[in-house]
Image: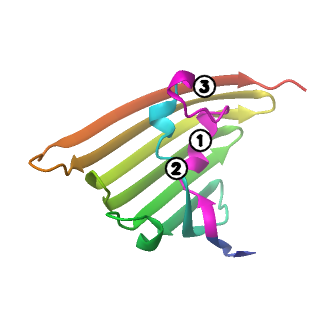
Amino acid sequence: IGLKGGFGKVRVGRLNSVLKDTGGFNPWEGKSYYLGLSNIVQPEERHVSVRYDSPEFAGFSGSVQYVPNDNSGKNRSESYHAGFNYKNSGFFVQYAGSYKRHNFTTEKHQVHRLVGGYDHDALYASVAVQQQDAKLTWRNDNSHNSQTEVAATAAYRFG
């Protein structure tokens, strides 16, 4: 359900997360460990949420998204997502971030992703960098978990 106009687009329902919308570097949608991009695409989900997408201004656009606690299940909290995009003459840059205060095994879970590349006519090339950080909440465990992933993709479309 949504509204679209000169102000942008407001939607409510089971929607792609802002992180999922930066997934062009993974054109095959592979999430399996055997397909190689499993860790970097793991936070890409579809949530029952409220999302606003701004109109494009001189190549710039943005999105904000709120996922309520009721959608997250037991021992979890709401999450917040934001994304910013720029495109010009085939070149593009995308940033997406998410924050969830509580999860079953973590607290203060953050994901930040930056994607840059070129997409024009039949050629597509991009590089993505993603940083995840969270505090582990297992009993008697006061440690942090942090990981950085990098992915590069080049593709040529026929037809």
The answer to whether the residue labelled 1 contacts the one labelled 3, judged by CB atoms less than 8 Å apart, is no
Residue 46: image location, x then y, percent: 57, 56
Residue 145: image location, x then y, percent: 24, 40
Give the secondary structure at mark 3. strand
User: Label 2 belongs to which residue?
Assistant: 19
Mark 3 neighbour class, 10 Å CA radius: few under 14, some 14 to 19, many 20 or more: some
Q: In this view, does 66 lie to the left or right of 27?
A: left
Cα separation, mark 2 vs mark 1, equals: 7 Å
Q: Residue at x 55, y 36 (%)?
A: 116
Residue 100: image location, x then y, percent: 35, 60
User: Label 1 belongs to which residue?
Assistant: 23
Over which residues does the magenta segment extend? 13-35
Labels 3 and 2: the sequence-earlier one = 2
Q: In this view, does 80 lie to the left or right of 5?
A: left
Q: Does the magenta stretch include residue 21?
A: yes
Cα separation, mark 3 vs mark 2, equals: 17 Å
100 versus 20 height, above or below? below
Q: Is residue 130 magenta?
A: no
* Front position in the image: 31 or 4: 31
Q: Is residue 53 left or right of residue 2?
A: left
106 versus 154 height, above or below? below
Q: Residue at x 67, y 33 (%)?
A: 27
User: Label 3 belongs to which residue?
Assistant: 153
Seen from this angle, which residue lies furthest right? 159
